[in-house]
Amino acid sequence: MSKAVRLRVFRGTGNDPTTFRYDTFDVPAEEGMVVLNAIHYVQSRLDSSLTARWNCKAGRCGSCAVEINGTPHLMCKTSLGMYDGEVTVEPMKAFPLIRDLVTDTTASRDTAGAIPPFTPRSVSKRPWLFYQGDVERSRELRKCIECFLCQDACHAIREHAADYIGPRWVAKAASFDMHPMDGSNRSKFLREEGGLEYCNVTKCCQEVCPEHIAITDDAIIPEKERVVDEHYDPLVWIYRKLKKRR
Amino acid sequence: MSGFRSKGHPGKGVATDDASYETMTADVLIVGSGGAGLRAAIESSDAGASTLVVCKTLLGKAHTVMAEGGIAAALGNVDPGDSWQVHLRDTIVEGQRLGNWRMAEILAKEAIDRVYELEEYGALFDRTAYGKIMQRPFGAHTYRRLCYIGDRTGLELIRTLQDQVFKRKIPVMDDVEVTSVFKDPATGRVSGAFGINIRTGGFLLFRCKAVIIATGGCGRVYEVTSNSYESTGDGAALAYRAGADLMDMEMIQFHPTGMISPAGVRGMLVTEAVRGEGGMLTNASGERFMEKYDPKRMELSARDVVARSIYTEMVEGRGSSNGGVYLDIRGRGADYIKKKLPSMYSQFLEFAGIDITKDRMEVAPTVHYQMGGIRVEPDSCRSTVPGLFAAGEAASGLHGANRLGGNSLADILVFGRRAGLAAAEYARTAQPGRVAEYDAGDEMARLLAPFKVKGGQNPFALKEKIASVMWKYVGIVRSGEGLAKGLEEMLAIAAESKNLEAKGGRTYNQSWVDSIQAWNMLLVCEAIIRSAIERKESRGAHTRSDYPDRDDAHWTVNVIVRRKGRGMGCEFMPVQKPPPELESLFRGG
Ligand SMILES: Cc1cc2nc3c(=O)[nH]c(=O)nc-3n(C[C@H](O)[C@H](O)[C@H](O)COP(=O)(O)OP(=O)(O)OC[C@H]3O[C@@H](n4cnc5c(N)ncnc54)[C@H](O)[C@@H]3O)c2cc1C
Ligand code: SF4
Ligand code: SF4
């Protein structure tokens, strides 16, 4: 196969627009080639100054998140066969640029640290007993590989960056809330510090999630309902806890 | 650029000849945020030591996140006959008697506590019908022993430990490549470490009393591997250069089943859980060939046995259309497969366009794990350099000549914790050492060299070259002749590597950081090849066509690699004999 793919790659460093440009590279196409393969080809054969973040190359770590033709994607999971003509690769726009395709996603770590942690309720029996059915709801949200593509896609973050923690972190809080042994409650956090009200349920986040997590349906909406219930009726909260405890 | 863009980092980076550094201080510096590093951090911090974690990719992305199958621990939840004694026996016997009995004993006993602890930290394990932690069968484990979280055990392990690190407010600096460990010239004890802040390109000096190396393995030195970008053997190279012993470096585990096509995903792991859940291996003519090699355990034989069997089918011309063998799980039915192996189902669908509920998978061996590494004292994870500790895949001794699936996640929790505890205890009484100014100066000169080269070697291409030499000469089956050739070529590449060129500025410069990693890889490859040349027998993962048999009379020894003058020397150390009450467990192995 001698067909070539033309990549158009964003280049630039930090907040210095004088360094911003697009470079074009022709890469020989191979059966089943993904965007990350093409980037590696560029690095080892055409231009070693190109920088991109990657790690597991298997869709498991969420490091290689970028925008491909304007849509958030993982480079390791995006086949070049999907596109006709030139393919544009750019860094995620919702995060500060470091260089080329690499952005800084670490600021949201403070958010992660602020979510009230998993706090086991006191039970006398050890080791814990609970059932497979109790596991599934939280489990789905735990598939998250922290690629932050959902944060990149979310317009509520773009408009209220300082006030809304974003879909990834709502899902994280929900994964704790849905843990069968958790004795804490994150509604207050999500309402007062999380800015959950800014989400208007557009579902853009769940559309881009490479793990196919139904972020809006299975985390955001249930948490929104809880926030409303409990904000207006604290008794609901107590009732829920008792129910969970069975 | 059009539209919205978040405000960037300062555009002006550090000058390419800037020889200044920022200083950070801690009692215990932990290099690596995989399972071993994070578990060590929790323990070190709980023991009262000021603790700093650094890692070269992002927190939460370490290689450990890829682990699928599970954690081995003899809970006996499914098979009540299981016990730490049986787990210990399996580990030593399947390690072909090369492993350290004491490490295996600690692992078998403590893995149980570590699993329950992880559950109380918040990890959500699969359950039995009675509500206990579920356990699945895995290759060469006598009983169903692997505790698992779907097929995302490693991811959940990392997230759970990460949350504990946040809870304790332990500082973590990511995007930091540690490049050297420093010793006090007067005492020979660890006094610090040096590194690069990859995001800014600036240098960092860490002043600390103890360093724990938890840098994982070196799979990336091979062309076909399941390992992630960061697995370049940095830890072994750092420790070796600081004067520590390396051990069992010839023992590289080939996982029997990696993907082979399309080319871009070659090497990607197909978890052993597929075989654990009933997957069958067949050759081109549909024969279930494991019947020939291990009729009793079949597909669930030890990894070295299954990998060699597949290799034999392939080289003897009975391979699949793409040159591997077939792995078939279709018999289990679509619902079962999607429930028990969801990641494998989507991995094949998304990366290869294959629906494993309807079609066979094609697989071939892939480099997976380093059994060797830094030599440590079993109880405390101390290396031979005072103040230097190692845990996890970077350390050696536990797995001998073959690691059992699931024993690594157990290893990183058990020995991560022990390393954290021992380092914190050591730091409590140790005096802070001195970092010689010339050490930092020499190190910066070494690190900045790739910026001075013009028209030099491309580091990415050089890394590929290293990996292809290893694949060609130091693979599943080795020979004295091939290894000698491999060594010669590796030393030639090492000579070329002085000419590596970093292109562009220092801000997140991958060509620069990869140059430094390439130097580490070369050192580790040399250690692997030299050890493989020395071991003139076949044992576990190390197969020599010119010495096809296991030779206990001469080779019940570990090969030690140590700095000798300006070169690399090998020595042999007899494997420690277990006390009689344990020896009786191993009879017949
Ligand atoms: C696909 C796959 C599946 C697996 N499945 C299983 C399984 O089911 N069960 C099991 O027991 N084992 C499994 N393993 C093996 C197991 O996952 C690893 O051996 C284990 O996770 C290693 O953990 P670690 O903490 O030692 O190191 P790692 O997780 O490799 O972490 C290394 C850390 O060190 C950092 N680092 C490296 N070099 C430097 C440097 N120079 N400076 C700063 N930081 C550095 C890295 O950034 C990283 O944070 C699997 C492995 C793979 C590849
Ligand atoms: S559903 Fe909410 S969180 Fe998701 S993208 Fe829309 S606004 Fe953002
Ligand atoms: S929820 Fe999905 S898109 Fe968002 S960070 Fe996690 S894996 Fe990525």
Image (tube, coloured by chain):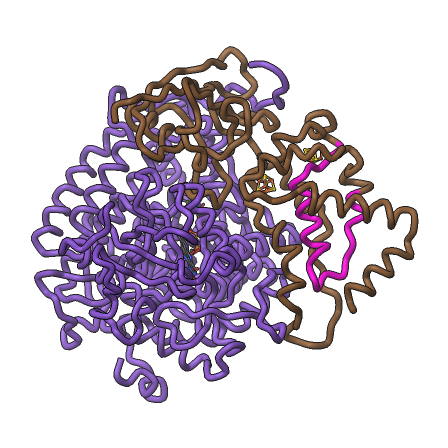
Chain colours: A brown, B purple
The correct choice, above or below, for B269 with respect to B414 in the image is above
Q: Position of residue A202 (x, y in %)?
A: 71, 32
Instruction: Examine the structure image and report whether residue B46 is included in the region drawn in magenta.
Output: no
| Residue lying at 30% horizontally and 65% vertically, measured from the top left | B402
Q: Is residue A20 left or right of residue A189?
A: left
Count the labels in the image: 0
| Residue lying at 45% horizontally and 37% vertically, measured from the top left | A77
Q: Is residue B542 left or right of residue B194?
A: left
Q: Position of residue B508 (x, y in %)?
A: 45, 29
Instruction: Please state, as top left, top right, bottom left or bottom right, where the C terminus of chain A lies in the image.
Output: bottom right
Q: Position of residue A210 (x, y in %)?
A: 54, 40
Foreground: A193 or B197? A193
Q: Is residue A105 left or right of residue B537?
A: right
The correct choice, above or below, for B577 with respect to B403 in the image is below
- Furthest toward the top, the residue is A18
Q: Is residue B423 visible?
A: no
| Residue lying at 14% horizontally and 66% vertically, measured from the top left | B537
Q: Position of residue B441 (x, y in %)?
A: 37, 35
Instruction: Write down the region rendered in magenta.
Output: A163-190
Q: Is residue B469 visible?
A: yes
Foreground: B502 or A165? A165
| Residue lying at 10% horizontally and 51% vertically, measured from the top left | B482
Q: Is residue B397 left or right of residue A118?
A: left
The correct choice, above or below, for A38 with respect to A217 in the image is above
Foreground: B474 or B281? B281
Instruction: Please state, as top left, top right, bottom left or bottom right, where the N terminus of chain A lies in the image.
Output: top left
